[in-house]
Each structure stands twice: as structure tokens, then as C-alpha cells.
Image: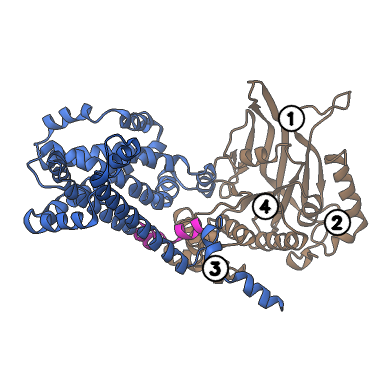
Chain colours: A blue, B brown
Amino acid sequence: MSIDESKKSNNQSNPIKETFRVYGEVSTFVRANLFGIWILLFLGLWLLSVALRNNMSATMTSTQLLDNWLYNLVRPFPSPGEVLDALYKMWSKHQLLSHVWSTIKLNIVGLLYSTVISLVISYSSVIPIFQPFNRFVKLLRYIPFIGFTLIFFSLFTIGWPTKVAMLTTGMTFFLVTSMTDAVSAIPRMKYELAKVLGYNDWQIFYNVVVRPTLPQMIDMVAQNAAIGWIMITSIETYSRNEKGIGTQIYAYYSTNNLPEVYGLLLIIGIIALVEDGLFSFLKRYLFPYSVIAERG
Amino acid sequence: MIEREEIVPGPLNKVELLEPLLTLDKVCQEFPLNNGVKVPVLKDLSLTIMDIRSKPQIVSILGPSGIGKTTILRIIAGLDRPTSGKVLITEEVTNNLREVKVGDVGVVFQKYPLFDDLTVLDNLIQPAIRVAKLDSKTARERALEYLDKFGLFQHSLSWPVQLSGGQRQRVAILQQLITGKHFIILDEPFSGLDPVSINNVIKLIVDIANQHTLNTFIIITHDVTSALIVSDHIYLLGREVNEKNEPIPGAKIVKEYDLIAEGLAYHSDIEDLPRFIKIRKEIKAEIFPKL
């Protein structure tokens, strides 16, 4: 075997090896298959639990402890068919799209406001006078949300303004924490490079602090957008007469309509997937160097 | 082999010294240890770099690792203030001697930091516009000219993360030059390089220094041979010893070599000269006594 041939055979991918190798390059083919396998696994487990539930409810005796435990475990899961039926029913009769759009709108507006506010607070942390305020905002993420609701109710009209204010505030506490960490992680050498070049304070602020950290800020927003979705469902329940996925989940959950609840959660999952993809695209498109730098 | 006489023609041993360019006057620097005790790193360190007529110059500050070379660099660059003592620099326009401030002296740091979010070309253009106040067209033309002259033209649109160490070093030096600085200090430019790369870096430093007669490069290094090849003047950094032959904390300039007077500057094949070999041996014995 010549050197070239041996190199070639070494480089030839073995899908099984690729799948389990630590920190290896994975081909698109293997990656796509792995993705498919996990989806099948998820669906398989789902169907299995439904089959188990149907089977057990017919044969179970109350003395069998294991049966009881398993039954309780799988009982809440509706079948895929039930979830699809529920989704169709909500879409055709209960304005599903309008509820989804209302929540997406709330999420976008909240994310936008909290991003702008958090960027200002985080970037200002390089200026000593603002540091105590930054620290205070970061600490607020430990305070239970109920502590702020009364303030919001007295400051804003109940409904859309309160919801936006709650989501913005809640996300800001977390965003400021992550964004300030990104700002603190700027190496001292970068500041010193700008200083010895002769940059003034504002030029250093823009060229060392703001501009180079923007790609990380997109990452921070993407990570904290998820926290936003966790908050949204509880925030929407504060004004239940309005539209939104949160109000719907609450309503269906309290009336024990679990297929509808899981249907709505599935929609949130799909939105999250799209949102993550959009953030990743935005970062690649706006800051191509950051992707090259991450790859090393 | 670097043939400096081809690059800087001029008579040997006859260089007219003008006024001081940079003066370190009894500079002391102390740092607290973890137990709170303050330890002197530099003690009464004084040196003067004189201007030489119509020639760029390269000066080296030589010393072993851990002696305080980077501390000197930071003080000369104005990044740190000394505990006592002064660093004075001559203003280019008025010729007045005044205390150094950050931005007066260009620094090429050891890891060659650049603005990673800007292309190589923009890494040169932006400082040229912001600091040297060039208009964007002139800045672009000058940046491209530099990149072309130093073999980086095809990397103009690369991101700094895509460059090799040597290419980063070149961009880092050019970035300081394009802001109009003539006083540039380089931290360990030969560190971790193989002999071929060291020769390339020496040639690069000489080439870049020769871009302007006012250029003065200070090289901070522990590499005796490279410093001797590239420099006109060498300052040895060391510690004095007490009667028990133990080093006294706090480094200072223990010796200096005027390589122009020694006939070792602007000379080809200097590595083969007996005087070069002798001085190298002497310096090694001085700064690495146990070797």
C-alpha cells in the first residue's frame, strides 16, 4: 500500500467509529443519521409508553407495586395521535394560530427590550461608576418574581403592557448576568493594545468592549431566550383573558386536557428550534470571523 | 546571515550621538507578594537612549527570564507607573523632554494581540484613521503598501485568527508603525522560534526599522545571539550580589555595549567575527552565570 493509499484508508470514515469518537470530525451523513436516530428514539419511547399504558390499564392489579409505579409514570402521556387531534381541534376551533402569534409577539418585544437594556447595563460595567448598579441588577435574579408583580400592576395597565414589562424585567436580570460576564472576560491585553496605539477612552470602549463582544452577545441572547419561554407561560397566566400559549396551557391543564397541553408544548419546542437556528444564522452572517475563531 | 550594511549604509564606528530620546531615571518598581511583603523588581534602573543622526536604531534590553523585562516594557510604554523614578521621552516636534504617557511608545506584545473582529487590512486602516488622523483613502493606500512590502498582501482580507504566528507578528509591528510611531518596543520577538524563523524575524525588524530614519526599536529579549546581531546598542539587565555572592532583589542595568563603537553594527557576517564571539560569551557569563 502506498503512502497515499494508506492515508486515504485512514481518512475513510467509519460511521460507527465516528459516532463514538471523542472530539472527532463528524461527516454530514453521520450527523444527519444521528439526528434521525434520536427523533426515532423519542417517538419510539413515546409510543412505547402509550402502549404500556393502554395494556396495563386493562391488566393491572392494584397489588403489583411495579405496575403501579410504571402506570403512574406513563399515565400522563397522551399518544401522538391524540396530540395531533388536539392540535387540529385547537387550530380549527380555538384560534390556535392567533394564540401562538400573540406569544411570539410578546417574546420578540420582550427579548428586544431586555436585550437593549441589558447591553447598556453590561457595557457600562467597564465604567467604575456604574459597577455597583450592574451588581445590583445581577442580584435581582435571585428575587422571586412575585416581588415585582405588585410594582408592575401599579405601574402598567393590566394586559399587554404588564406582560411586556414582566418579561423584559425577568429576562434582563439573567441577560445582564451573562452579558457582563462576556464583558469581564475581555483580556487585559486587548485594552492595552488599544491604549498603546493611542486610542482614547471612547475609541477603546467601542473597539475593545462593544464591537468584538457582539457575537457573544448574540449567544447570550439565544441562551436567555429560552428563559423567556419558561417565564412566558407563567406571565401570561396573570392576565388570562388575553390570548397566548401560556393562557391556553393553563386553561387546558386545569381542565386536565393533557393532549392539548402537550400539543402546545410541542409548538413551543418547534419555535425554539427555529429561534435557535435564526440566532445561529445571524451570528454566522454578521460575524463570520467568530465562527472561524470558535472552530480554531 | 543578516547583512545590515546592505540595508543601512554608513561608515563604521562613526555615528553622531544627538540628544537623549528616552531616559529612565532611577526607576524602581515593587510588587507585593501573596503574603503582603513588597519585593523590588527594579531598583534604581537608569538608562538613556540617545538619538543617532540620520539612522534608525535598534536597542536591546537583555536579561534572563523572570528578571523584570516585561516590567520595564510596561513602564516604558506608560502602561504602569514606577514606584519611584521617572521615564522621560523627547517630544518629536518640540524636542522637549517630558514624562512618558501611554500611547507615546508603540508596543508589540509577546502574543501579538490584534483586533480579532477586523480583517488584517482594517487592523491597519482603523488605527491609521483614528490615531494618525489619515483620511480613509490615504490610510487604505498606506496599509496596502505596507502589506505588500511585507508579504501580507494576499492576507489583506483574512481574519487575524487565520494568520500564522509570524504573520501576526508582522501585522502587529505594522499596526504600530502606521499610527506614525517611531518609538516601538518589542517584547520577546524571538521567543519560541526555530533558527530559520529567528533569522526571518531579525531581517523583518531591520527592514521595518529602516522604513524611517527616526525609527527607534527597543527589543526586550533573553536571546543573546539575536540581540547581538540585530542591535546597535545592548543593555544588560541583572542583579547585584552581596558579599555572600547572593543576588540582591531588584534588577538594574549592569552593563551596556555600544555595538557601533565595537564595530559590530551595520556589518555583514558579524556572527563569525572574533569580537562578536567574545562579547556573546561575556554576556552569557554575565546574565546566565550558572550555565
Q: Earlier in the sequence, mark 3 or mark 2?
A: 3
Q: In the structure shown, which secondary structural element does the residue marked by tag 2 occupy?
A: loop
Q: Is residue B27 above or below residue B9?
A: above
Please provide the residue range marked out in magenta: A280-296
Q: Is residue B11 above or below residue B109?
A: below
- Picture quadrant where residue B284 is located: top right
x 84%, y 41%: residue:
B288
Q: Which residue is mark 3?
A: B155
Q: Nearer the viewer, residue A91 or B138?
A: A91
Residue A289 falls within the magenta-colored stretch: yes
Q: Position of residue A168 (x, y in %)?
A: 23, 41
Q: Which mark is residue B217?
A: 4
Q: Which residue is mark 2?
A: B263
- How packed mark 2 is, by other alpha carbons closer than 10 Å (few <14, some 14-19, many 20 or more), is some
Q: Position of residue A91 (x, y in %)?
A: 12, 57
Q: In the structure shown, which secondary structural element does the residue marked by tag 4 occupy?
A: strand
C-alpha gap between disc 1 and disc 2: 32 Å
Q: Which residue is mark 1?
A: B250
Tell which subunit mark 2 falls on: B
Q: Earlier in the sequence, mark 4 or mark 3?
A: 3
Mark closer to the observer (2, 4): 4
- How packed mark 3 is, by other alpha carbons closer than 10 Å (few <14, some 14-19, many 20 or more), is some
